[in-house]
Structures are given as structure tokens and as C-alpha cells.
Image (cartoon, rainbow, N blue to C red):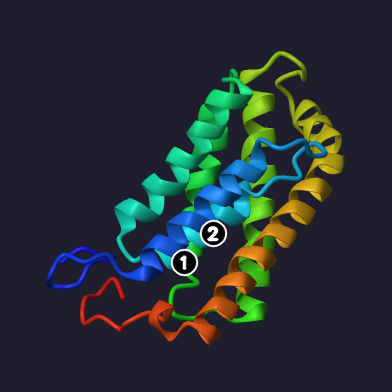
Amino acid sequence: MNEGQNENGAVFPRSIVVAGMILLAAAARIAPHPWNFTPVGAMALFGGAMLRDRRAAFLLPLAALFAGDIVLGLYKWMWIVYASFLVSVAIGFWLRGRRTIWRVGGATLLGSLQFFVVTNFGVWAMGGLYPKTGAGLAACYVAGIPFFWNTLAGDAMYATLLFGGFALAERFFPALRAVEASSPEA
């Protein structure tokens, strides 16, 4: 049985709301914003935490990211960004059934840090801006620090909106609460 359906094939409201929130976050990405202050990391964490079907957890946020890139424009190192994005979805799996303020905060920080490490390493390894030395790698990371703070701030704000907004919705609309499944993915 699919995560978002009951035995009659009806889609649960929870799946619709989670998908809608991911799509809204993707739409917010194409609005004007400071460099790296986007909902991308939070969207990946949220998808990983909230979509029980692992394929949907990876594919829906990835498709939303790609749709935004179609609008904003494709770029040379997007595969590195996508790989990092998939790591953030996997970090979101750690939040499944254990969403607390501290865990979401920790996962958000971890997601921002891994994005910084992975993407700056990719820029250093694949680009021609920095020499392929330890000093060049260090210079690349130092140059990326101002972008890291925007990434962390954007991830924190959008994680608060996504996870906090959904927690509020669960409180007021009990049909959105997760139904514990007997499968190992629950």
C-alpha cells in the first residue's frame, strides 16, 4: 500500500498537505532573495522527514528543485547541488517520528554544514577558480563563508515555517497526524 493512500486508494490529506508545502517552498525559491537564502535545504529535510515513501521523499523535493532550476536557469555544477540536496533528504529520514525543536534544529544545522562542505569542495575540485592544493581548498572554503551564513539563515527560517507550520496544522486538523504503520519504514 502506498504511503499516501488507504486500502480504498483514497489519498490521505497529510500527503496532499506535505506535497503542497514542498511545492510552495519551491515556488518561494524563484522569488527574489539574497544569495543562498532559499528554502532548498529545509524543503529537502521536510520531504525526508514527512514523506514515508522513500522514493517520494527523494523524488518530490528533487522535482521541485529541478522545476525551480528550469525557471531560474541551469548551471554548470548543479549535479553537485543535487547530490548535496539528496544528502539533506537522507538527514530528514532521521527526523521521522522524532520531530522535536532540538532535532529539527540539529538536522537543519547539519544540512547547512554538509551543503557548505559538499558544494565548496565541488567548486574547488571541478572549477578553475582555486589551485588544486590544500591552500586552494582552504581559500575556497573561506570565500564561501558569507554564503554559508545565508544558507543557514534560509534553512533555519524555512525549516521553522515548514516543520512549525505542519505541527500547527496537525494540532488543529487531527487527520494530518501520521498513522503508525507496521512497516519498517514507519
- What residue is disc 1 on? 49
Residue toward you, 63 or 150: 63
* Residue beneath the point at 21% across and 66% down: 10
Residue 138's quadrant in the figure? top right
Q: Secondary structure at mark 1?
A: helix
Q: Quadrant of the C terminus?
A: bottom left
Could you tell whether 62 is left or right of 162 in the image? left
**Residue identifier under label 2:** 45
On the rendered structure, is 44 left or right of 58? Answer: right
Dot 1: few (<14), some (14–19), or many (≥20) neighbours within 10 Å?
many
Which residue sits at x=60%, y=81%?
100
Q: Amino acid at mark 1?
A: Ala
Q: Is residue 111 above or below residue 31?
A: below
Amino acid found under the numbered disc labelled 2: Leu
**60 lies above or below 74:** below
- Residue 92 position within the rendered picture, expressed as x and y whole percent measured from the top left: 50, 63
Between residues 65 and 122, which one lies in front from this camera angle?
65
In the rendered structure, are the residues bearing label 2 and label 1 in contact, judged by CB atoms less than 8 Å apart? yes
**Location of residue 77 in the rendering, given as x and y in whole percent from the top left corner:** 59, 24
Identify the residue shown where x is 74% and y is 48%.
Answer: 151
Compare residues 10 and 100 and report the one nearer the observer: 10
Above/below status of 165 relative to 123:
below
